[in-house]
Image (spheres, rainbow, N blue to C red):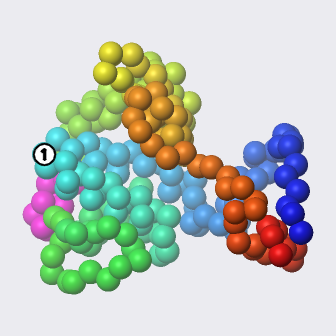
């Protein structure tokens, strides 16, 4: 049986209704309270200013992973953020792996310095400045990607699924998502129906 491909149809929905249902079933408890991440954002500004890029990226990756992966430590609370940073493995690449104990990204003294740094005027101002810059670039969500090409032309992109557009804007070679001809694909099942050949 050859699959039928229909035209895409726009179906208006209530995003509020979707978010309400998602909060009940798919996201951490107290999701919106946990999303008030001023202190973690300040901590990341402190780390970015005082550590190598690799350390900053590892800390960012770990905090994002912890936010969305059970047991969902509430990093909006300073004490839980400090505990979470103290547990971050130096070689963290994802929560699907096991990491040896005793090789944290930050020492206890460094965690205390990071947490103290979140309360300094300098770091508070850094977060405000970054936020104001995003607003000046017409940001309406995150991630908000500000991309500048080799000629100095700037364009903004919203969403982590927009990298193909970024690569195209920069003139970089890339493989976009593409559908294979049905005749060239092995058959597969979807929703109890067989799609493809056979």
Q: Nearer the viewer, residue 34 or 134?
A: 134
Circle 1 — which element? helix
* Residue 95 visible in the current orientation: yes
Q: Which residue is at 61% across, 64% downward?
A: 27
**Residue occupied by mark 1:** 50
Residue 164 higher or lower than 72, as above or below:
above
| Quarter location, residue 100 | bottom left
Q: Nearer the viewer, residue 179 or 17?
A: 179
Would you say 5 lies left or right of 186 here?
right
In which quadrant is the N terminus drawn?
bottom right
x, y percent for residue 84: 31, 67
Instruction: Name the outermost residue toward the front.
Output: 183
Expressed as whole percent of the image width and height from the top left, the position of residue 88 reads 26, 69
Within the image, what quadrant is residue 187 found in?
bottom right
- Left or right: residue 158 versus residue 47 is right
Query: Residue 19, position in %: x, y?
Result: 71, 53
The residue under the point 22% across, 33% down is 121
Residue drawn at the location 83% of the way across and 43% of the way down: 8
Residues in magenta, as a range: 107-116
Q: Position of residue 22 (x, y in %)?
A: 70, 60
Q: Most prominent secondary structure in the magenta stretch? A: helix
């Amino acid at each position: 049986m050859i699959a039928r491909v229909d035209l895409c149809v726009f179906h208006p929905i209530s995003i509020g209704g979707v978010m309400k249902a998602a909060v009940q079933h798919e996201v951490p408890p107290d999701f919106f309270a946990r999303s008030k991440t001023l202190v973690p954002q300040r901590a990341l500004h402190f780390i970015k200013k005082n550590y190598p890029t690799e350390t900053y990226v590892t800390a960012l990756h770990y905090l994002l992973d912890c936010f969305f992966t059970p047991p969902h430590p509430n990093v909006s609370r300073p004490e839980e953020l400090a505990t979470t940073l103290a547990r971050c493995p130096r070689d963290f690449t994802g929560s699907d792996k096991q990491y040896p104990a005793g090789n944290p990204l930050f020492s206890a003294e460094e965690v205390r310095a990071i947490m103290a740094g979140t309360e300094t005027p300098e770091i508070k101002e850094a977060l405000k400045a970054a936020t104001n810059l995003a607003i000046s670039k017409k940001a309406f969500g995150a991630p908000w990607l500000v991309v500048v090409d080799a000629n100095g032309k700037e364009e903004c992109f919203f969403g982590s699924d927009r990298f193909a557009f970024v690569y195209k804007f920069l003139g970089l070679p890339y493989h976009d998502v593409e559908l294979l001809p049905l005749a060239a694909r092995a058959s597969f099942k979807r929703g109890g129906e067989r799609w493809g050949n056979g």
